[in-house]
Amino acid sequence: MPTRLIRSVSLASLALVGLASSSLAETPLPFAVANARAQMASPEAIAEYRYRLQQYQAARAEFDRDAEAYWTAVAEKRRIRNAKRRAGDPLSADDYVLVQPPAYTGPKRPVDPEPKPQPPGERRSLPVVADFVKAAGDYYQFTPQRPASEVEFKRAYARAARAMGLTREQAVRVYSFETGGNGDYDMQSGLSKSRPGSRAISTAIGYNQLLTTNTLVLLAEQGQHILKVLNDRAATLSGPQRAALERKIAVVKRMVGVARSIPGNWSEHEKLGRTPQGWGVHALVLDIDVGPLLQTHKLLTSVKFARQKGYMEPLTAAELEMMNLTGDGTGFDMVTMPQALREIVPTSNFFQRSGYERNPVAIRHNTVAKLLAITDERMDVNSAKPGARELYAAF
C-alpha cells in the first residue's frame, strides 16, 4: 500500500476557532422562538426582507461563479503539477495559481422575519477513549497497557523515534504544534482537562494526533515492522513479562490482519474506522508498547516519502508538519518549493475549496512562506511549555 494513504485533516489544528464559530451561526432557532417571530412580522418587514434577499442571492451567485472558475483553475494546475512531477519535469511559477481566491464582499444574508420552525437536529457524537478501550475488549479481548505516568510514555516515544531516525527537534516541535505543548499520550482532539464539558471534534489521539483511519492504514502498511519490534523485545524477556508481551503480539497480529483485509484506499479504511471494530484497533494508540511505534510511523512515513522522491535534505519540523497535516504529496509540493516561490504562491493551491473556506489561518497566512512561518512561530511558543520540555528531556 502506498504511503500517500497516511493523511490527516488538512490543517485542522489551525482551524478550530473558525469551525466552532461557523457551526454556532448556523444553529436553527428553537421552534417556539421561530413561531413567535413569524407571527410578529409586518407586511413591510416581509417585503423588505424579500428585496434584500434578492440582492443577496444575486451577489452570491456572481461570487460563486467567480469562485467556481478559480477553484477549477486550482484543480487543473494541481493535475498538471502531478503529471510533471511524475515525469520528472521541473516546476515553475506558471504551475500555480498566483492570485488569491475571490472573497465575498456583498451584502449579508438578511434575517428572515418569518423563520420556518425547525426541530433541533440530532447531533452524532464521536467515540472517545473509553469507547475505543471498550471496543478493544469486545472485539479483540484486549486492554491496552497504559503507562504508569505521562513521562513513561514520553520516554517510550523518544526511544522509538530515535531508533527509527526522527530527530529530537522534529519530534518535540511537531508535538508542540499538534498538542499545544502540553498534550498527554491519550489527549483527544477537542477534549481538554482545562475545559470541563468540552466535546471531541475528531478521533485524533496522542502526540501526533492519529485518527482511527491513520491507525488502520499504519497497521496495514507498517504492521510487519511493528510486529518485528515487538518480537525482538519479547526475545529479551522471560517468564510472565514475555508471556504477556507474546499475548499482546498475537492481538496486534489479528488487528494487522483486519487492517489488511480492507482495499488499499483511505476511504475504505475510513469506513472501518467508523465502526466499533475499527475503534478497537485504534485503542493500540494508548498502549505503552505499540502506541509510540504508531506515533513515530505517522511522521516517519512522511520522511520516507520525501526520500523516495529524491529529496535528501533533512525536513524541518514545520515542513514535516505540513506533510503530516496536508498529506505527503501535497506537503511535499510545499517542502520542495524554492523560497522565491514560497513567497508568492497562495496557500489555496493546496486545498479543496470547502477546506480552505473553513480555515481562517490558511486564509490569513495566505502564502506558503507565511503558513510555514506561523507554524514555526507556534512551535517556538509551545516548545517552552512543560509538556514539550518534558518530551525534550525524554530524548
Image (tube, rainbow, N blue to C red):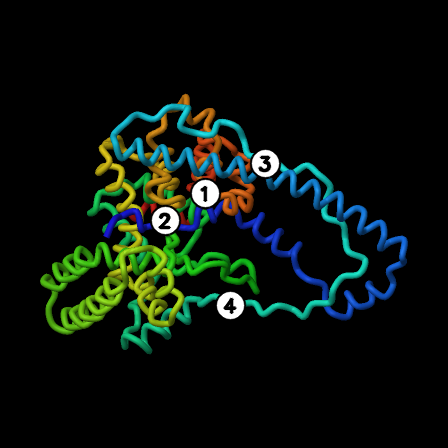
58 or 217, nearer to the observer: 58
- Find numbered disc 1 in the image and state the secondary structure of the residue it sits on: helix
Q: On the image, numbered disc 2 is attached to which residue?
A: 390
Image location (x, y in percent) of residue 156 = 26, 55
Q: On the image, numbered disc 4 is attached to which residue?
A: 125
Say if 341 sits above or below 356 in the image. above
Q: On the image, numbered disc 3 is attached to which residue?
A: 66
Q: Earlier in the sequence, mark 3 or mark 1?
A: 3
Foreground mark, 3 or 4? 3
Would you identify the image quadrant in which residue 251 lies?
bottom left
Would you identify the image quadrant in which residue 91 lies?
top left
Horizontal placement of 238 versus 315: left or right?
left
Q: CA distance from mark 1 to mark 2?
A: 12 Å
5 or 60, nearer to the observer: 60
Which residue type does callout 2 highlight? Glu
Q: Earlier in the sequence, mark 4 or mark 1?
A: 4
Kindly check if marks 3 and 4 are in contact, taking CB atoms under 8 A apart as contact: no
- Find numbered disc 3 in the image and state the secondary structure of the residue it sits on: helix
CA neighbours of label 4 inside 10 A, class few (<14), some (14 to 19), many (20+): few
Q: CA distance from mark 3 to mark 2?
A: 50 Å
Residue 382: assigned label: 1
Image location (x, y in percent) of residue 95 = 40, 28
Foreground mark, 2 or 4? 4
